[in-house]
Every structure is written in structure tokens, then in C-alpha cells.
Amino acid sequence: MTEQAQLFIDGIWTDGSTGRTGAVIDPATGQPFATVAHASPADLDRALAAAERAFAEWRAVSPYERSKLLRAAANLLRERAPAIARLMTREQGKPLAEALGETVGSADHIDWYAEEGRRAYGRLIPARAPGVRQIAVKEPIGPVAGFSPWNFPVSQAVRKIAGALGAGCTIIIKCPEETPFSCVELVRCFIDAGVPAGVVNLVFGVPAEISEHLIPAPQIRKVSFTGSIPVGKHLGMLAAQHVKRCTLELGGHSPFIVCEDADPDEAVKLGIALKYRNAGQVCAAPSRFYVHERHYKRFVDAFVAGSEALAVGPGDQDGVTMGPLANARRLEAMEGFVADAEARGAKILTGGRRIGNQGNFFAPTVLTDTPEDARLMIDEPFGPLAPIAPFADLDEAIARSNSLPFGLAAFAFTRSERTATLLGDRLEAGMVSINHFGIAAPETPFGGTKESGYGSEGGSEGLDAFLQTKFISEVGLRDAAA
Ligand code: NAD
């Protein structure tokens, strides 16, 4: 492995101009194993100049040609996926199979934007006067400042990079300092596919320094951030101050409702898989389980058994089904959530503690009797904690599901078409998935409502996020003279 993850600015891999670096830590051991270059203001200025210059060239490349380059990048990502997955597991902790699935799936996102970029249609609007042609066209908005998180180092960065490029924009992306190496390899796929210098620029550094430099910069026309709600609010304000378009994909606190008529065994199987994927560090993971009292005991028992059956260990070891938490901050956060819940009367049926004293391993944890005012029921846990609560009446479950100021994802199980429709209509979430896991495919919109953010990544909306509408009204000179 390269010892230092470098910046990529204007077609050149480089260390930061001041030589500043940060440590990259293996979450399975807690030990640093490499460094990541930090960008200085001068480095960011070079990236801004490059993104601006390259925008003039890239927007002039036909969508057909851009599509070919993006498809080539997708193919490289697929070919290189096994090696990239190993890097990701080392720096992020998730089991190798998950890292591989994420990387291969990310290639599909590139393919989607490669194609969707060719369909950035405008429209012809009938005019009031003869001879007048009124056209709405979609243009690439301009250079983008992207900020992607550490939980899915490749699949979060790819949505911003491929979306921007498919639309004809250039991008400066600040990828996560905790997990830089898989991001470096993702960017390399675009470069090796032939994307011109300056179109994709990759930086790392002190997040606040970078966002405060890039967002106000006049070259930047669009901000796209995925991460926590407090940081999203801050960046949203910064973008608003400078009237920059902004997409915010923030946290949530997703309810998972098991209705009276549901099959509890099917529900528990999916609940466990979604809860513990990536050790629960998934913005759309279920984080509050509301189970009809008829199934409550059976569901809780099965959830405990399933949680205890998980093999927790280093992600590169055979048979491991849940890796360590990605960083020590998450470990402290889990301990805090559990202590608070316990102090308020919650029962810990399994887990509830760190495993070992090396690395960030935390046991899959099931809680019952967690009061609705416990921090765990209010703040996104972003970890392997599963609070389960019974309900008697569906209206009550829906009200509890909608009671928080967030609305990213919601899940439900029911056998009734009528109930499924009602849940789809009434759950306040950007994405509702009923009887299966059906969110996050490239062709479907991904995003939240309320404080979970605004804008979508994925679907035709994902491309639209990087386009602006221009209206052109023209009348032929001959017509005007007539
Ligand atoms: P954090 O709030 O410190 O940071 C969240 C992300 O924002 C990180 O990627 C970080 O690098 C970046 N960031 C922080 N300050 C920034 C700034 N001023 N400008 C630009 N970027 C900035 O929290 P954390 O400890 O890294 O993560 C914990 C929380 O973040 C979780 O509880 C979860 O709610 C949220 N999170 C959400 C997602 C998601 O997919 N929506 C992903 C990762 C983390």
C-alpha cells in the first residue's frame, strides 16, 4: 500500500504544499498505518483554478463522448474492485464482502450517470406570438465542491463525482481523511479512463478549513455534502450566504414498523441484515424498531439470537459478518447511548459493550424498554444498537415514527396492500421501503426530508442536481421584420 494518500489537483498527484499530513488508522487495531496529505489554501486555489478552466472544456465535450469516458471508468472500477475492497476494509473496517459489494455497486452508479447525462433534455414552450421560439435548456451548473463521508468511502463519493461529470460539471471533492485510499483508487479509475486534467480534483485536509475556503469561492457553483446534520446545517448556511445551490444528504433515525399482519420471521431477517450492515454506520439503517405487540416477543427473541450469531472481528478475516466501528469517536458514542438508555430504565438484552480493548469493536446490541426520551431514540445512533418497542395501534406507531425532526428512510412490514399504501403515504421520510430493502439503486432518488436534508442523489433527480435551467426566447429576424 502507498504510504501516503495524495491529493489530485489539475491532473497531478501531489503532497500538500505545506507538507501537512494526518494519520490513517486501522479500525481493527487502532494503530496508524499510513498518512494522508492535507491541502493548504494554496493547493485549494490551484484546484479552483483547474476546475474553472476545465469546466469550459468539459462542458463542451458532447454527452455522448462524456458517456464513453464514464463507462470506461465504471469498467475499470469493476476490474479493480477486489483490490479497492481490500484497501477499504483496512481503512474503514467493514467486512471484505461488503467492501466488494459497495465497490462493484458504485460502478453501476457511474453507468447510470453516463447514460442519464445523455438525457439532460430541455423543452420547447409554445409561444404567445407567431415566429417566437421559447426554449428551456439544461446546462451544467459549473464547478462543484463535494464533501463525502467515511462510512461508504466509494459509494458516497461516486454519486457526487459521476453525477457532476455526467452533467458536464467539474468537481473538487473532499473525501474523508479517515478512509482516503479507496477514494484515491476511485478517482484513479476516472483518470485512467481518460477524463481530462482539472475535471476531477481530489483533496483531503482539515474539513472546516476546506469547506470555508471552497464554498465561498466564486468558481464554485454547487455544493454537495453527505454527513451529519450539524455539519450539514453549517455548510447549508455557508452555501446560502453565497447563493450556491446545495444538496444535503444528512443523517436520519429510521423507523422499522412490523405490523400485526406481517410475517415476523421475514421482518426480523431483514431487520438484522439492515441494522448491522457496516456495523450500523449507515444513514438509512433502521434505528427504531416498532413491533406490533402480537409479534413483539417472538421478534425480540429472534433479533437477540440473530445479533448473537454475528461474527464480529477484523473485516478481512474469513467468516466475519460485522467489522469494527470506523473510528474511536463511534465507540465513545455507542458507550454514551447505552449508558444513557440504561440510566433511564432500558434493558440491554445482548451486547451493550465494547469487545476487547484493541480496535473499535462493539457488540451488536438489543435494547427494550428504552424510553422515547432516551438519547438513543432521539439522536441517530450510527452504530450497532437496536432499540425495540411494542405498539398496539398502527396510528400510534406512525405517530412515533414521525415524531423526530428527521426523515431519511422508513421501513415497514405488512401483508396488506391497503396498509402498505397508507404507510407509504403517511410516513414522513424521503424514502419508504415496504416488505423489502428497496432503496439506494442508481436509478432511484435517494434523499431525505425535514432535517435529513434536501435534494436527491440518484435517479434523474441526481443528475438534475448538477444542472441549471436556462430559458431562451428567440424570434427569427425575418419574422421580426415582417
Ligand atoms: P462529524 O459531524 O464531525 O462529521 C461528519 C462528516 O462531515 C465527516 O465526513 C467530516 O469529515 C465532515 N465534516 C465535519 N466538519 C466539516 C466541515 N466544517 N466542513 C466540511 N466537512 C465537514 O461527525 P463524524 O464523527 O465524522 O460522524 C458522525 C456522525 O455523522 C454520525 O452520527 C452520522 O449522523 C453522521 N454521518 C452521516 C453520514 C451519512 O451518510 N449521511 C455519513 C457519515 C456520518
Image (spheres, rainbow, N blue to C red):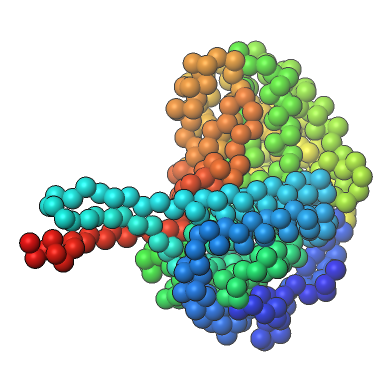
Determine the residue located farthest toward the right in the rendered image.
318
The quadrant where residue 246 appears:
bottom left
The part of the image, by quadrant, that contains residue 46 is bottom right
Q: Quadrant of the C terminus?
A: bottom left
Quadrant of the image containing the N terminus: bottom right
Q: Is residue 134 above or below residue 146?
A: above
> Is residue 325 at least partly visible in the picture?
no
Closer-to-camera residue (147/295): 147
| Residue at 83 percent of width and 41 percent of height | 321
Task: Report x, y in % for residue 172.
Answer: 56, 70
- The answer to whether residue 122 is seen in the rendering is yes
**Residue closer to the observer: 210 or 164:** 164
* Residue at the image point whose x is 80% and y is 33% from the top: 307
Position of residue 339 relative to residue 212, above or below, is: above
Q: How many marks?
A: 0
Q: In this image, 110 relative to 350: left or right?
A: left
370 sits to left or right of 467: right
Residue 22 in picture, x, y percent from top left:
73, 74
Residue 263 lies, in percent from the top left, at 67, 16
Where residue 145 appears, x then y in whole percent?
52, 67
Report the residue that reaches farthest toward the left.
Answer: 482
User: Which residue corresponds to the image point at 78% horizontal and 55% vertical from the top-left?
Assistant: 79
| Residue 19 position (above or below residue 26) | below
Q: Looking at the picture, tell me which residue is in the foreground, 92 or 369.
A: 92
Q: Residue at x 68, y 24 (%)?
A: 267
